[in-house]
Amino acid sequence: MAIGKLLGTDGLKNAKPLVIDARNITKIYGKKKQEKFVALKNVSLQIAEGESVAIVGKSGSGKSTLMHVLAMLDQPTKGELYFNGEKIGKLNSRKLNKVRNRELGFVFQQFFMNANDTVLNNVMLPLVIAGTKFGKRKRLAMEALHAVGLEDKAKNKASALSGGQKQRVCIARALVNNPSVIFADEPTGNLDSTTGAMVEKTLFDLNRENGITLIVVTHDEDIAKKCKRQVRIKDGEIELDTKKLVELKVGKDGKGRVELKAVKSRAEMKAVQGLTETKMKGKR
Ligand SMILES: Nc1ncnc2c1ncn2[C@@H]1O[C@H](COP(=O)(O)OP(=O)(O)O)[C@@H](O)[C@H]1O
Ligand SMILES: [Mg+2]
């Protein structure tokens, strides 16, 4: 059933569309019993359009695993993921690729690029996959390069760029499909602090000015603080979430809407979480 189908459409003034709705996600690595490792335990997380969310926690806590599940790069062992109200587990791989390619942009710590190819070709790649015609591909890629201040590097070989420039090319490539969500996994992890700050600014500008939902995995407290919401993972569980949806309604378009509320304390987080979960169980 669509999210919150039974709820009314009144009182949605402050409500935002729900983009990501992950319910009771468990991820177990390894097949044989002695090799099994539970990397995520029953994690539920809802993210509304336009949010900036930091996923923080120690190394090995499950941050990347969670991001990979939310970004449809990996399947959960248990639980369900809804993206814009659509149940992802039900999609075949062709449709899944389509949703991922159209809606999501990725920025990783290691600047995954074709080093021997030009900057422009690297940025155009998602459009090649999407089947966009060459003229349009080039125009969109140049626009994305402009957004990260690198249009003058379009013809350069990717390998000839500095680390910060490479990461900005990756951001341009993440942007080129006009995604609704950008996932960044330790985007400044391989950069010095000045260059990192520039990359960081580029990401936050996109969130603020273009309304792109930003989900950043980081152990950098400064980046985390700049996000409006922090989700802390410990041993595969959410230990702290500074915002929680408190209302779930459905708009005329049939999409879920949530009201986000700041959570001040751990006790309150538990209380809100409990409330939300019972409420949502009943409404699904
Ligand atoms: N493909 C895998 N196979 C087995 N274990 C894995 C795999 N990927 C990650 N893990 C384990 O899962 C845990 C969480 O990993 P990860 O999500 O990468 O943590 P983080 O990003 O917070 O550092 C770690 O203990 C890691 O060793
Ligand atoms: Mg990681």
Image: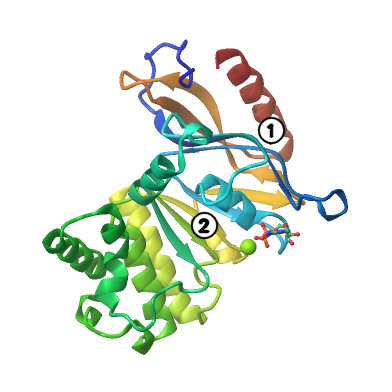
Residue 283 on image: x %, y % = 55, 14
| Furthest residue toward left | 135
Label 2 beta carbon less than 8 Å to ligand 2: no
Residue 15 on image: x %, y % = 40, 28
Tell me the quarter of the picture where residue 163 sits: bottom left
Q: Could you tell me how many numbered marks the image carries?
A: 2
User: Could you tell me how far apart the alpha carbons at marks 2 and 1 are, in whole angstroms?
Assistant: 24 Å
Label 1 beta carbon less than 8 Å to ligand 1: no
Number of other residues with Cα within 10 Å of mark 2, as a class: few under 14, some 14 to 19, many 20 or more: many
Above or below 59: residue 265: above
Write down the residue under mark 1.
268
Q: Residue at x 56, y 52 (%)?
A: 68
Above or below 278: residue 60: below
Choose between 156 and 19: the one closer to the eye: 156
Write down the residue under mark 2.
216
Question: Which of the two discs, 2 and 1, labels the residue nearer the N terminus?
Answer: 2
Q: Amino acid at mark 2?
A: Val
Tell me the quarter of the picture where residue 256 sits: top left
Q: Residue at x 41, y 33 (%)?
A: 84
Question: Residue 265 vs residue 74: left or right?
Answer: right
Choose between 108 and 191: the one closer to the eye: 108
Circle 2: element type: strand
Of the two numbered discs 2 and 1 in the rendering, the one whose residue sits closer to the viewer: 2
Question: Residue 95 vs residue 79: left or right?
Answer: left
Question: Residue 187 vs residue 124: left or right?
Answer: right
Residue 176 shows in this picture: no
